[in-house]
Structure formats: C-alpha cells, structure tokens
C-alpha cells in the first residue's frame, strides 16, 4: 500500500478544470517530482494533499487513512511555498512561533520548540532578524523549519541525529525513511 495515495482527484475553479481524475502513489521515503507548465495543477495537487485546498472529488489517503476532508493540522503534512510565505513584520522567532501560538500551546513549550527549530536549522545568529534582512537560503530554512516542525515532532528526542542527517544541499537516505518529499518544478511555457 502506498504511503500517499491519491485516487480520482479532481479540482476546478469557476468551472475551469485544474486537473481531473488524478491518481498518484508515493511510497514512504520516495522522492516525487511533479513537472509541468505553469497552471497545470502541480501546486494545487500538493495543496490538496496538505489539506490547504479541498478537492471537488476523489480521495487522498496518507498512511492508509482517508484525509480528504481532514483539516491540515491533523494530517502531519508540511508544505514550503515557492515564496516562503514569511510574515515580513515578524522576526525569525516570531515567524516560527506564530503557528504554535495559534494552537494555544503553553508559552514555555512554544519557546522550547522554536529554539529547537532555530538550532536545527543553524539560524541562531539570525533569530531576531526580519525576513527582509535574510538571505534566500536563510528564508528557505525558516520556511522549512515551519513545515518540518510537525513532521519532526515525533523524533524530537533524536534532534542530534536529525540535525546530522539534514543538510539543505542534499537529502540523505536515512532521513527519507521517515518523510516523503514532493518537489514542484516549473517548466517554461
């Protein structure tokens, strides 16, 4: 059984079909790359898997569980957007704590999780910086930290191991055993 299974998924906006009857299987640890021209539905499909866009029809299963109508926070899926979606008026710490605070977690727990992610991503020196002052790679690490937080939570006790395996230039095979990575490539029109 596939770890991520999409069956007969369809989505349209204002009567215009983005995709129709899409089937996709991704095994645990597999890297899946979606390639196609702008507007063909790559990002919409990933948003559907993450729960950010509801499909018009079809089924999305993650680890055998139907999550088609499950809210994003209960799916255990993270997504890093092309433009990182960082709040420009917030520091790195504030960007990372925002979602946790929305979950009404205790302040001490939020602080601990934010500090852990800042350390994991090697952003200690930039924790008080705003996105406009960060390099592209630093912005990417903040967005990745935000997306990975929910995925790494079960492995928090092995932070040193995860840190050793996570190199933003390469995705190492041991890390792939635990997470699925989907990447969208935009092909010029």
Image: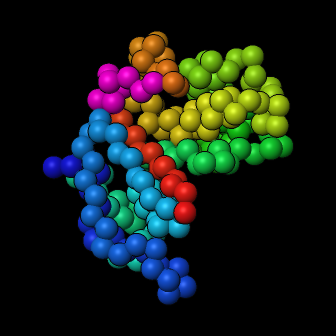
Of residues 114 and 80, the one nearer the viewer is 80
Which region shows up in magenta?
A: 170-178
Q: Is residue 23 left or right of residue 145?
A: left
Of residues 30 and 126, the one nearer the viewer is 30
Instruction: Inspect the magenta stretch and tell me whether residue 171 lies in it.
Output: yes
Instruction: Inspect the magenta stretch and tell me whether residue 42 lies in it.
Output: no
Q: Is residue 158 visible?
A: yes
Tell me: residue 134, above or below residue 57. above
Q: Is residue 138 left or right of residue 15?
A: right
Tell me: residue 153, above or below residue 183. above
On the image, the x and y values in percent for residue 176 come to: 33, 30
Of residues 106 and 101, the one nearer the viewer is 101
Residue at point 56% right, 35% down? 144
Total tally of numbered discs in the picture: 0
> Which quarter of the rendering shows the C terminus?
bottom right
On the image, the x and y values in percent for residue 30 come to: 29, 39
Tell me: residue 116, above or below residue 11. above
């Amino acid at each position: 059984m596939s770890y991520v299974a999409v069956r007969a998924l369809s989505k349209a906006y204002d009567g215009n079909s983005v995709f129709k009857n899409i089937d996709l299987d991704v095994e645990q640890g597999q890297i899946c790359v979606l390639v196609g021209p702008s507007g063909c539905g790559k990002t919409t499909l990933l948003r559907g898997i993450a729960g950010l866009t509801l499909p018009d029809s079809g089924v999305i299963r993650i680890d055998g569980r139907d999550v088609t109508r499950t809210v994003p926070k209960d799916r255990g899926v993270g997504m890093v957007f092309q433009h990182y979606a960082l709040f420009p008026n917030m520091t790195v710490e504030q960007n990372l704590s925002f979602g946790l605070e929305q979950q009404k977690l205790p302040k001490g727990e939020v602080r601990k999780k934010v500090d852990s992610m800042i350390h994991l991503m090697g952003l200690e020196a930039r924790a008080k910086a705003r996105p406009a002052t960060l390099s592209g790679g630093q912005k990417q690490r903040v967005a990745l930290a935000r997306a990975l937080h929910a995925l790494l939570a079960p492995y928090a006790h092995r932070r040193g191991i995860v840190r050793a395996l996570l190199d933003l230039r390469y995705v190492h095979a041991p890390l792939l055993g635990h997470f699925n990575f989907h990447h969208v490539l935009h092909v010029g029109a």
